[in-house]
Amino acid sequence: MTVTSRDRLRRGGMTALQICAVAALYYASGKLGLLQQLVRGQVTPLWPASGIALAGLLLIGPRTWPGITLGAFLINISLNLPSITAVLVITTGDTLAPLCSYALLHRAGFRTRMNRWRDALALVFLGAFTSMLISATVGCGTLHLTGALPGGFWPTWWVWWTGDAMGVLVVAPALLALRSARWPKDAPPSRWVEGSLLGAATISIGLLQTSPTPLLFLAFPLLTWAAFRFQRAGAAPCALAVSTFAIFAATRRSGPFAGHTLLANMISLQAFNGAAALTALLLSAAITERNQTQEKIEEACRRLAEMVERTAPDTGGPPALPHAQSDGEENGGQARPS
């Protein structure tokens, strides 16, 4: 076997392993999302599998799309859909949505580091809100045509679309942040203490979200703190945590979601989740972009100072300024009359 053949076989094996990993993660996250189902045992307010699918495409590449298809097929085949045709059609919609999201983000010049304001906007409006229309429309349309949709079309479509979009907004950024995370070196002890306090505050506020008192708004100071001090590495996990606690309360109709209709709860829940994700993504991107601009300015000042130091005369002091001419020199060498 030649070296080229071995390299080709190794790359093929690595690709197959990546496809299987994406399929396994998609299936596991889908089953986890179905624990909070609301409509027909399969429509959930948070579909983390869509975030898994998009993150896999962004980090590995479009060659992993068979893993998305396989994971979606395994989930849909386990849901007792009316026919195998319905399974295949819904699986196709679940595959096309993240692929469309990847294509739009790629065309917009999206960076997985999300260190620019435009990256956050692209993920929100192109990766989540626009692309997830495909999976929601195909899925709800298929269930409606086969007579397997007990509720109204539009309420189910709304939950399906927002669930897929929220999966992109809260799960994909957390995975992208985890992928680029590095163990901090030479971090002062105060930084570790602050990070620990942020984690404890996230859990505490999450528990308050499920209490009878409507305290959802307490999540926003937390997200602001995380974005300002830790940027995406802190804001993305916090947004995922507070959204998960809110979904837990909404699906059980406890806390601020008690005593309301399903549609009212879903509107309130997805409005909160969308606002939390937007706050975390946009604010952390803005702070990161500001920090990068400040670093560039400091670097330019340092280089300018070095350039001035190299060009200054070696007199042991700062460069000399030209002396002003005397009164006599100003008058052609003649002294002014007194």
Image (tube, rainbow, N blue to C red):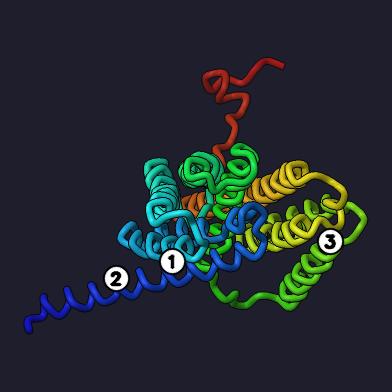
Residue lying furthest top: 337
How far apart in space, not on screen, are marks 1 and 3 (Cα)? Answer: 33 Å
Q: Position of residue 220 (x, y in %)?
A: 78, 51
Write down the residue under mark 1. Answer: 74
**Mark 2 closeness class: few <14, some 14–19, many ≥20 residues within 10 Å:** some
**Number of marks:** 3
Residue type, label 3:
Thr
- Residue sitting at 60 percent across and 32 percent down? 324
Tell me the tag on residue 20. none
Q: Position of residue 172 (x, y in %)?
A: 53, 58
How far across and down, in percent of the image, does residue 74 sit? 43, 66
Residue 154 in view here: yes
Q: Is residue 260 left or right of residue 74?
A: right
Q: Amino acid at mark 1?
A: Leu
Q: Which residue is mark 2?
A: 15
**Residue lying at 76% horizontally and 44% vertically, measured from the top left:** 268
In what element is the residue under mark 3? loop
The label shown at residue 210 is 3
Seen at 29% across and 75% down, the residue is 14
**Which residue is farthest right?**
213
